[in-house]
Image (tube, rainbow, N blue to C red):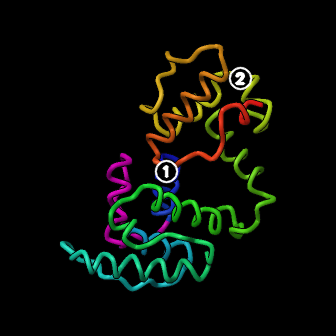
Amino acid sequence: GYMLMKWVNSIFRNSRVQMKKFRNLSQFFASFKTGVVLARLLEVLSGKLIPVWDEKNLSENDRINNVEIVLGHLKKSLPGLNVHALGIVDGVRKDVLSVLWSLARVFHFKRPLDSTSLITAELLTWMTQFVDIKNLTTNWAERPRALMEFVASLEPTAVNMEDATDNVSTNAGLALSKAEDIFDIPFKVDVESLIG
């Protein structure tokens, strides 16, 4: 979430859209509930006008309608996107993250959602901004604290580096567990296969 917040801040900073800088994750995720910030972000990225209600005190129906308008535009470019308006309006982090990551893939990395052959290289490039690793296979076992460092770089309060040990399994398990709790995204990998 933290890295995507920085990305969104940089998008708005380099555009003509007047948007307050997001300073914390709670504010960041809450800002998407009306659909207005998401519409403005898509406008900046795509260069297309997204007409949504932009007023204070929007009703829940107005917020849902706004998000549905934005998702309708998004699904033209991202047919694999499986997010519902109510999840965004309710502030479900994994739904917001799914939309933002999809936007980043298409507009930042310039990759369609089905270009899976490039995902590993993109992921490694992105992760090296936060932690010193050279690959996504042996580095986890060679650097017992690397996964904890990565999670801490995304959310500094997620893990306490003083809890790190020299045991890669313990550290990886703690990092994955904390990341799942903080980011509310279930991981489809177990510790042993990660550090293999």
Residue 193 locus on image (x, y percent): 73, 36
Mark 1 neighbour density, 10 Å: few (under 14) some (14–19) many (20 or more): some
Q: Is residue 159 above or below residue 14?
A: above
Q: Is residue 115 above or below residue 161?
A: below
Residue 153 locus on image (x, y percent): 53, 35
Q: Residue at x 32, y 63 (%)?
A: 90
Local secondary structure at mark 2: loop
What is the three-letter code of the residue carrying label 2? Arg
Q: Residue at x 45, y 78 (%)?
A: 70
Disc number for residue 6: 1
Q: Is residue 41 left or right of residue 194?
A: left
Residue 147 locus on image (x, y percent): 62, 31
Q: Is residue 105 above or below residue 147?
A: below
Q: Nearer the viewer, residue 24 or 179?
A: 179
Q: Residue at x 39, y 66 (%)?
A: 88
Label 2, label 1: how far apart the Cα atoms are: 27 Å
- Provide the residue span drawn in magenta: 15-35
Dot in front, 2 or 1: 2
Q: Is residue 193 above or below residue 188?
A: above
- The C terminus, quarter of image: top right
Kindly report the secondary structure that dominates the magenta region of the rendered protein: loop
**Quarter of the view holding residue 132:** top right
What is the three-letter code of the residue carrying label 1? Lys
Residue 40 locus on image (x, y percent): 42, 73
Mark 2 neighbour density, 10 Å: few (under 14) some (14–19) many (20 or more): some
**Quarter of the view holding residue 167:** top right
Between discs 2 and 1, the one toward the N terminus: 1
- Residue lying at the far left of the rendered structure: 57
For mark 2, what is the residue?
143
